[in-house]
Image: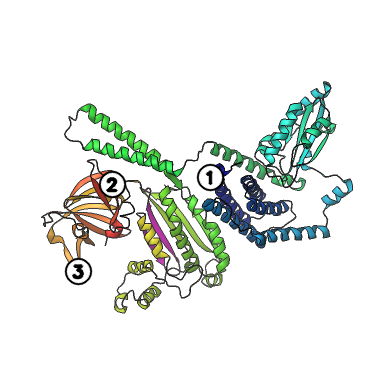
Amino acid sequence: MDMSQYLEIFIDESKEHLQLLNQSLLSLEQNPQDRAVLDEIFRVAHTLKGMSGTMGFSKMTKLTHDMENVLHAIRNGELKINPDLLDLLFKCLDALENYTENVVNTGSEGDNDYAGLIDSLNAVLDKKAQGSQKAPSLKIEKEEKTDKPVYKTANFKLSEFEQNAVKKAYSMGMNVFEITVVFNESCLLKSARAFIIFQALERHGEIIKSVPKVEDIEDEKFDFEFTVVCIAKEEASTFSKEINQISEVKEVIIKPLDPEKLNESQLEENEDLSGVSNLQSDKKDGEGVREGNKSKVMSHKTKTGKTVRVDIDRLDVLMNLVSELIIIKTRLEGIEDIDASKNYAEAVEYLERITTSLHDSVMKVRMVPVELVFNRFPRMIRDISRELGKDIVLTMTGTETELDRTVIDEIGEPLIHLIRNSADHGIEPKEVRERLGKSPSGHINLKAYQVGNNVVIEVEDDGQGIDLEKVKQKAVERGFLKKDMVNNLSQKEAIDLLFKPSFTTSDKITDLSGRGVGLDVVKTKIEQLGGAVEVETEKGVGSKFIIRLPLTLAIIQALLVVIGDEKYAIPLNSTKEIIKITPEQIKMIQNQEVILLRNMVVPIVRLNKILEVPGDHDEKKNMTVVIVKKGEKTSGFLVDSLIGQREVVIKSLGKLLSGIKYIAGATILGDGNVALILDVNSLAV
């Protein structure tokens, strides 16, 4: 059977399951007694085993099978959770992620069989087996005396309705059997086997009860056994013959229903008897947890039932069509030599409303929560903490904040640099923090929130802050500045030195930092996305890196201006205000033209000179200046005239023209002409 058609589904679902496994392992590390989390980890490992087995990925199947054995021993109380065991499970997670990455890149799982990991898993189980031989449990002694296996699913009660059905069957002379089916532990598709068995049973009788419930069996939320109560005219041998012919069935136990079950009290409807989690010893303690799991499963089903996966290329096509529609709408608005009747004006106005609504809807489809990026950081902080010997707590807020998919794809790398920077440079060692009167645990806060048409992401730590004197000293040592210039630097200018390529304050190179390739990468990437980075720091208290990003990179509000004979667009989210000045107001400071605006010195940028625009650029009595902001800085762009605000569609310049300085893209105007979109970050002084 050709499984390649299911490869994309396998990849998507594997990534989701691995992310869930990562989160669950981190939760288990914080609370090793949480039975619900342990059950979730077991379920994910089992699902991955079934998926990889179905696709023919034998190495993934082998690894998840051995993981499942260890998790099964933990669930049964035969193994205790400790840091070494968790490290081993995290290594298994990394191996599964590598397998999945190989499947994405090559279509196969690769050649690495991770034999060392599998040996470690088996060694853990061997230690458990040796321990159990030395101190046999009460349960094992009981099984040895009876010489019969005790199946948990056989321990059930009948509701009043089921009791009445059994009594009526007896009165009609029919047989009522309690049938327990046990699968081989190597069985990969248990739910599929169970479905075949249910079909066989229903051909000869009627099933009135199933333990676990049918829904749980369909979802593979059971171990390797289940029990049903079946009413039939046939004898037990008929059922035994039918079921034993089905592959991967280890054992079938068929016996008449115990009459005592008809005399027991009625079971409450919401009681759950499924799976190994119902050990008699912890039944009362686990009741609330199981109820929580049940509601969680129900809400999960509801959510997935209303969700559909769409290829991102289709969304891009849809966005392009909406973009073309906006261009045509703008063109209709700009037609002047037409009899602009009332009906025409109303039609254009209605078209504008529809286009805006359609644009908003498409944008919402493209928006994804920053949680998709944030979720990778708890594991990263855990590993860094262990590597550096520091106690670091990561707190994430605003994970539901949404960004355009194109932005989400790009911000992961800058955030990794900032968080590593906080962990390595910012947070002090535990003994240093205690000496300074701080809490032994360092805290990194990762926060996201929306402000207007921008999303702000903050990375804040309560570490030692930035030593600005050391920054200045390193700047002189590395030849970035002369010694006499350093003393005149403001705090903002000193912090900006950190974003210079190859600049680092670290005295030694480690696996985490010290090569000076961190913050310059952050600044370059964020500015490519049309955003900005700001830094707030206080020595001995901590630092905060603030990233401001546009909500979307596809359609923006822009201010259209005229420079010489050409039209340009300035993104409106970078525009602060527009003022008129006279040539006399322009002054010179250190070879830079500036103006004084409300007691604030604002540098002037003559766009016609920088962009080398042809045309008449004679000095006018009244000159138009567009004040733009770049982070906390402001600059004044000198333009010839204004056209007005427009909703513009950003078009890429293509590979041949990529990387052109000062230009962020282009847009098509209503008259069919092209206007270049200015890159405010590179033009601002």
Task: Based on the picture, tell me whether residue 539 belongs to the magenta stretch.
Answer: yes
Q: Name, please, the residue furthest toward the top.
A: 172
Q: Quadrant of the N terminus?
A: top right
Q: Position of residue 666 (x, y in %)?
A: 28, 49
Q: Quadrant of the C terminus?
A: bottom left
**Quick check: 624 left or right of 374?**
left
Residue linked to disc 2:
667
Q: Position of residue 621 (x, y in %)?
A: 10, 55
The crowding category of the residue bearing disc 3, from other C-alpha atoms within 10 Å (few below 14, some 14 to 19, many at least 20), is few
Residue 291 seen in this snapshot: yes
What kind of residue is marked 1?
Glu
Residue linked to disc 1:
8
Q: Nearer the viewer, residue 121 or 357?
A: 121
What kind of residue is marked 3?
Asn
Viewer-nearest of discs 2 and 1: 1
**Quick check: 325 left or right of 9?**
left
**Quick check: 557 left or right of 567?**
right
- Pointer 3 or 1: first along the chain: 1
What kind of residue is marked 2?
Thr
The number of callouts visible is 3
Label 2, label 1: how far apart the Cα atoms are: 35 Å
Residue linked to disc 3:
591
Q: Position of residue 202 (x, y in %)?
A: 73, 28
- Pointer 2 or 1: first along the chain: 1
Q: Which residues are magenta?
A: 531-552
